[in-house]
Amino acid sequence: MSEPLIAELGELLTLEEPIRTPDAGGGAVIAWSPVDTVWAAIRPRSGSETAIGDRRVARVTHEIWLRARAPVTPAMRFVLGDRLFAIEAVLQAGARRQWLKCLCREELL
């Protein structure tokens, strides 16, 4: 898909990063901390459904486009209301690399 028009950046997303805090058992607890809010375009890419045990699980992937900004990494995620988008890859796009195209997987809360 081609890069979006500025007018298509109609979703205000929260970009979050994981914060690991050691616990008493030698492991870690992961909490999510907001980094920034960004205007973005969300474009569905594909969807599938599979059975895990006795239930059906849907998998939906999206492209999330935003203006290039300070580091966005696959360790981060986007939040829109009660929707979570785990970032799987970040690509620079555009003739002047002015866009980030994030390939994301939507997760259930």
Image (cartoon, rainbow, N blue to C red):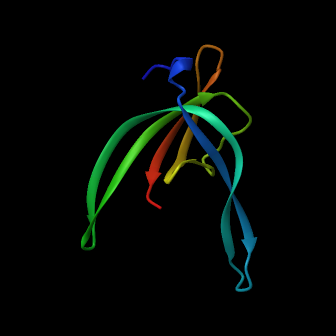
Residue 22, given in percent of the width and then of the height, sits at: 75, 75
Q: Quadrant of residue 94?
A: top right
- Residue at 51 percent across and 20 percent down: it is 3
Q: How many marks?
A: 0
- Residue at 24 percent across and 73 percent down: it is 54
Residue 84, given in percent of the width and then of the height, sits at: 51, 52
Q: Quadrant of residue 71?
A: top right
Q: Is residue 21 left or right of residue 2?
A: right
Residue 62, given in percent of the width and then of the height, sits at: 43, 39
Q: Is residue 26 left or right of residue 57?
A: right
Q: Quadrant of the N terminus?
A: top left
Q: Work out which residue is located at the far bottom of the displayed protein and give it.
A: 25
Task: Establish if 24 lies above or below 63.
Answer: below
Q: Work out which residue is located at the far top of the displayed protein and give it.
A: 95
- Residue at 50 percent across and 54 percent down: it is 82
Given residues 83 and 56, the one toward you in this image is 83
Q: Is residue 108 left or right of residue 68?
A: left
Residue 5, given in percent of the width and then of the height, sits at: 52, 17
Task: Establish if 104 lies above or below 39.
Answer: below
Task: Establish if 26 lies above or below 57.
Answer: below
Task: Establish if 55 lies above or below 90.
Answer: below
- Residue at 27 percent across and 54 percent down: it is 49
